[in-house]
Image (spheres, helix red, strand yellow):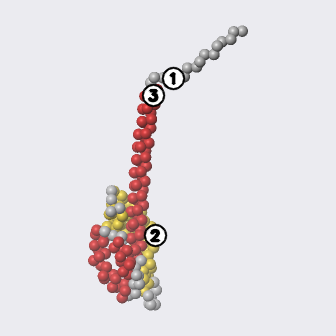
Amino acid sequence: MAVHAARPRRPRRTPRGAAPVLGVLIAMLLVAAFWIGTDLRDAQAAADDRQAATRAAGAHAVHLLSVGYRSVDADIKRILDGSTGEARAEYVRTAAERRESTIKDKILRAGALRALGLVSLAGDTAQVMVVGDEVIRWDGSKNAPREQFHRWNMEVTRVGGAWLVSKAELVP
């Protein structure tokens, strides 16, 4: 029997063209990961904007529907704080009259949001449909409470990072 001497093993070499191909593949994977990450961030930002715009419109509707004579100044301030532009100008114009009639008649309004939906969102402006109702009572009165149903088309605008109602139109 013949005994063969063990040959020292040579380290395996990668084919000469493998390193550049591997580098290109890694670069392509990094570009794809960056692209997908950017798309995901954009999608999340758009979802956050939709949610914030609808939340602002809904909160504004509840504030409009929940004004009482005991807290009228704070209630009006909340309405003004949640509005801008045309809507804010209208509320400022009618605030004194609303305050006076609410106190004089001892009105207690309690509102509830029933539904809302985003109609459109383009840049820093959104259109939101809002449905709410309120129960109106007069403190000290024997009159039965009155219920009212409201629908609005609200325009909501991003101002300095916050979404504010810039227009609120009652829908018949």
x, y percent for residue 107: 40, 84
Question: From the viewer's perspective, is 8 left or right of 62?
Answer: right
Closest to the observer, 75 or 50: 75
Task: Please rate how many residues cluster around mark 1, counting C-alpha atoms within 10 Å: few if below 14, some from 14 to 19, many from 20.
Answer: few
Judged from the image, the secondary structure of the residue bearing numbered disc 2 is strand
**Residue 165 visible somewhere in the drawing:** yes
Q: Residue type at mark 2: give it.
A: Arg
Identify residue type, mark 1. Answer: Arg
Which residue is tagged 3? 19
Residue at x-position 35% and y-position 76%: 77
Measure the C-alpha gap from mark 3 to mark 2: 63 Å
Find the distance from the CA under tag 3 to the CA under tag 1. 11 Å
User: How many numbered marks appear?
Assistant: 3
Q: Dot 2: within a 10 Å radius of its alpha carbon, few (fewer than 14), some, or many (20 or more) residues?
A: some
- Give the secondary structure at mark 1: loop
Residue 13 tag number: 1
- Quadrant of the image occupied by residue 91: bottom left
In the image, residue 156 sits, relative to residue 4, either above or below, namely below
Which amino acid, by three-letter code, is at mark 3?
Answer: Ala
User: Residue 104 sits in which quadrant?
Assistant: bottom left
Residue at 42% across, 83% down: 108
Q: Position of residue 163 (x, y in %)?
A: 36, 64
Give the quadrant of residue 54.
bottom left
Lateral position of residue 85 relative to residue 37, left or right: left
SS at badge 3: helix
